[in-house]
């Protein structure tokens, strides 16, 4: 299984979007899956506030494992990632991607009632992982 499929599988197995993307790439850069899952735990659902998509946050953490020693290089890959994610998906803000504000109980209910976490989020995880994979090559 490649890192992209691994990320989607982790998400579908109940991990947060941030955990799934980060953990799928972490072992290649010296961080255990278990550590990555712990580190990524509080970044899902746009840090629970509908802000930057957790799949993007996980992706940026994964890129940081490779490029974090060089500020200029890490800044460049961060911008490259976010620009490409936005180009592909229209935004990198969770509430914009879902079309509802999941920082409120009403927004979470709307997302659940409309299966947004099962229909949109896996695609965001896949998109983020594909972009990371491309950048890492």
Image (cartoon, rainbow, N blue to C red):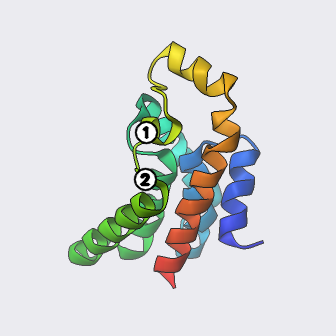
- Residue drawn where x is 42% and y is 75% of the image: 66
Residue at the disc numbered 2? 90
- Residue drawn where x is 48% and y is 28% of the image: 100
- Residue drawn where x is 59% and y is 21% of the image: 110
Asked whether 135 or 91 is in front, the reply is 91
Q: Give the x, y percent position of residue 84.
A: 41, 67
**11 above or below 73?**
above
Q: From mark 2 to mark 1, how far is it between C-alphas?
A: 8 Å
Query: Label 2: how many residues lie within 10 Å, few (<14), some (14-19) or many (20+)?
Result: few
**Callouts 2 and 1 close, C-beta under 8 Å:** yes
State the quadrant of the N terminus.
bottom right
Q: Give the x, y percent position of residue 54.
A: 49, 46
**124 above or below 137?**
above
Residue at the limit of the structure toward the bottom, as seen here? 137
Is residue 39 visible from the viewing direction of this image? Answer: no
Tell me the element at label 2. Answer: loop
Query: Label 1: how many residues lie within 10 Å, few (<14), some (14-19) or many (20+)?
Result: some
Residue 70 sits in quarter:
bottom left
Asked whether 71 or 93 is in front, the reply is 93
Residue at the disc numbered 1? 96
Name which of mark 2 and mark 1 comes first in the sequence. 2
Residue 22 sits in quarter:
bottom right
Q: Give the x, y percent position of residue 58.
A: 49, 54
């Amino acid at each position: 299984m490649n890192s992209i499929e691994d990320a989607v599988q982790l998400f579908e197995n109940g991990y947060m979007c941030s955990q799934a993307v980060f953990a799928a790439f972490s072992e290649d850069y010296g961080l255990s899956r278990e550590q990555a899952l712990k580190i990524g735990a509080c970044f899902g659902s746009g840090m629970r506030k509908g802000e930057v998509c957790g799949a993007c946050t996980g992706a940026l953490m994964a890129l940081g494992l490779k490029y974090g020693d060089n500020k200029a290089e890490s800044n460049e890959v961060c911008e490259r990632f976010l620009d490409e994610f936005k180009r592909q998906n229209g935004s990198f803000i969770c509430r914009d991607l879902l079309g509802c504000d999941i920082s409120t109980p009403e927004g979470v209910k709307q997302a659940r009632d409309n299966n947004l976490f099962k229909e949109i989020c896996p695609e965001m995880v896949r998109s983020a992982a594909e972009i990371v994979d491309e950048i890492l090559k």
